[in-house]
Amino acid sequence: MYAIGLHNPKNEINVGHVLRAADAYGASMVAITGKRVRGPTNVSGAERTIPVLRGDDLHDFIPFGCVPVAVDLVDDAEDLLTFEHPENAFYVFGGEDETLGKKVLSWCKYKVYVPTNICMNLSACVNVVLYDRMAKLGRNT
């Protein structure tokens, strides 16, 4: 089982694309914090098949038994190419224009980055990480 947390995402379109990716790759849940997005733009209707939660602190939404994994371009992050995904994970992503910050990073057991020449947008990053998970762990994890 795995879930996705979005910390202060930048816009509704990206959140909608994240919901579509979550549905496509079989995530159990998406949790969203921050005030920049009112609601997702989501043509796939993923919110009808997976729970979408809103609140003030992503830490409160970590599913029991899941390991928090920050996906962020920070100095001590591990390259996604060599990262071994935990079986039960809570992947935490932020908006493209800011880091997750010390508070969120402090409770994440792992920190991972996607090795690219420039920073990716939120939904592209989520798709890459979820595909990497599926490729390494198998389709039904």
Image (tube, rainbow, N blue to C red):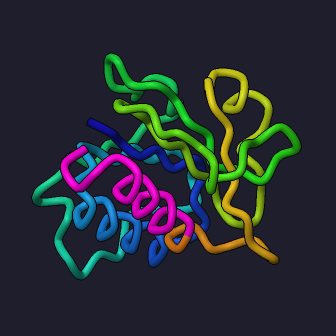
Question: Which residue occupies 41% across, 46% down?
Answer: 4
Write the residue at 53% across / 39% down: 84
Residue 136 is covered by the magenta coloring: yes
| 112 left or right of 58 in image | right
Q: Is residue 88 above or below residue 18?
A: above
Which quadrant: the C terminus? top left
Q: How many marks?
A: 0
Residue at x 38%, y 59% (from the top left corner)? 135
Residue drawn at x 73%, y 64% is 115
- In the foreground, 1 or 30: 1
Farthest top residue in view: 65
Q: Quadrant of residue 2?
A: top left
Task: Indicate the quadrant containing the N terminus: top left, top right, bottom left or bottom right.
Answer: top left
Nearest the camera: 71 or 101? 71
Provide the residue span drawn in magenta.
125-141
Q: Is residue 27 left or right of residue 50?
A: right
